[in-house]
Amino acid sequence: MTANEDDLKLKIFDSCPHCGHELSPWEKVLLSIDRALMCKNCWYRIILNQEDMSENQNKKNPKKKG
């Protein structure tokens, strides 16, 4: 994966992937818990896969070995 693809995946949590409208802090919480949210700006349904969640968690909290 390139750096641009990594940035795009992280932006999904900050803004709508369809219209780019920034999500409120409360919408970010709902998206992280429910993994689904409707954008109030364009009515696009944002649905996160479990794989998306685990990839972002691994980037935020890398496991230390040793």
Image: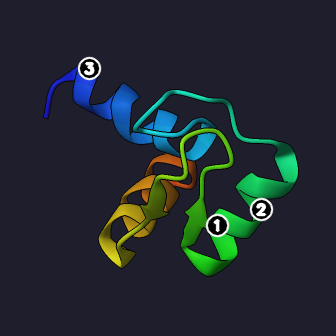
Residue to which mark 2 is pinned: 29
Where is residue 27 shown, x and y percent of the image? 76, 55
Q: Secondary structure at mark 1?
A: helix
Kindly identify the residue that appears in the image at 68 percent across and 76 percent down: 33
Q: Is residue 54 visible?
A: yes
Q: Secondary structure at mark 2?
A: helix
Dot 3 alpha-carbon crowd within 10 angstroms: few under 14, some 14 to 19, many 20 or more: few
Q: Amino acid at mark 1?
A: Ser
Residue in view at x 47 percent, y 52 percent:
44
- Furthest toward the top, the residue is 4
Q: Is residue 47 left or right of residue 5?
A: right
Amino acid type for the residue under numbered disc 2: Val
Instruction: Name the residue nearer the viewer: 23 or 3.
Output: 23
Find out whether the residues at labels 1 and 2 contact each other: C-beta distance under 8 Å: yes
| Residue bearing the label numbered 1 | 32
The residue tagged 3 is 4
Find residue 65 and report its image quarter.
Answer: bottom left
Identify the residue at image location x=47%, y=61%.
45
Extreme residue toward the front, this view: 42
Circle 2 crowding by C-alpha within 10 Å: few under 14, some 14–19, many from 20: few
Tag 3 secondary structure: helix
Work out whether residue 64 can be spotted.
no
**Residue shown at 74% from the left, 68% from the top:** 30
Horizontal relation, residue 51 to residue 32: left or right: left
